[in-house]
Amino acid sequence: MQKADVIEALNKAKTESPKRNFKQSFDLVMNLTGLDMKKTEHQVDQFIQLHYQPGRKVQVCALVGPELKDAAEQAVEKVILSDDFDKYAQNKKLTKKLAAEYQFFIGQANIMPKIASAFGRVLGSRGKMPNPKAGLIVPPNANLKPLHEKLQMTVRASARVAPVLQCLIGKEDMPDDQLADNALMIYNTVINVLPNGENNVKNVFVKLTMGKPARVR
């Protein structure tokens, strides 16, 4: 997939989309082929750090013990201490609200069993449990500020049930060059983990939130 092809598709998507009274997002959509989604090795689940900030504020929640309290409060949007885990374990509605409000959850490594017990059923079903692939399981003395900054640039490319994935690449007012670089970062990361690389990609589109998909390849 070439950068020029991505930029051409971005322009087509903009041209064919009616103007909206809000700033739309651009997504990259990849339809995959030749995969057996029941096989773990054919599934895609990648946390990808983009070249450019995709224009959205990522909300991060830290599930920590007292050792990480101060560092977490200085770095992330919400901190839940281990002493308060029972409140969430006993109130599924409260935990569901938490899962809806925060995109990433950081977990303190030495209390992960407690985190799993209190939050696992809800966060696990939404793919939001603290994930080591994204560096979200941390030691009790971790500096969370660099991690929080990294997460602002991170998207998750996931195709675990159906052979299709859709990822944010940015906002419509970003330069086409930056949107294309973000799209290529996702595309190249994904094809590198597919069993047959580009041969497992059926087609690729870019799409505005309320617009028609424009084919890249």
Image: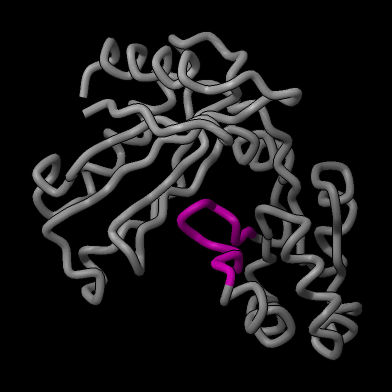
Question: Which residue is at the front of the view, 125 or 48?
Answer: 125
Residue 33, percent from left and from top: 16, 54
- Residue at 90% x, 83% y is 87
Magenta-drawn stretch contains 27: no
Q: How is the image coloured?
A: one colour
Residue in the picture at 70% in, 41% down: 58
Residue 21 against residue 210 in the figure, above or below: above
Residue pictured at 25% horizontal, 69% vertical: 37
Q: Nearer the viewer, residue 137 or 151?
A: 151
- The quarter of the picture where residue 40 lies is bottom left
Is residue 127 covered in magenta?
Answer: yes
Quadrant housing the N terminus: top left
Report the residue at 52% width, 30% height from top: 208
Residue nearest the viewer, comparing 131 with 52: 52
* Residue 99 in picture, x, y percent from top left: 72, 65
Residue 190 x, y percent position in the rendering: 29, 44
Q: Give the magenta range.
A: 126-138
Residue with the most extreme bottom position = 90
Q: Main secondary structure of the magenta part?
A: loop
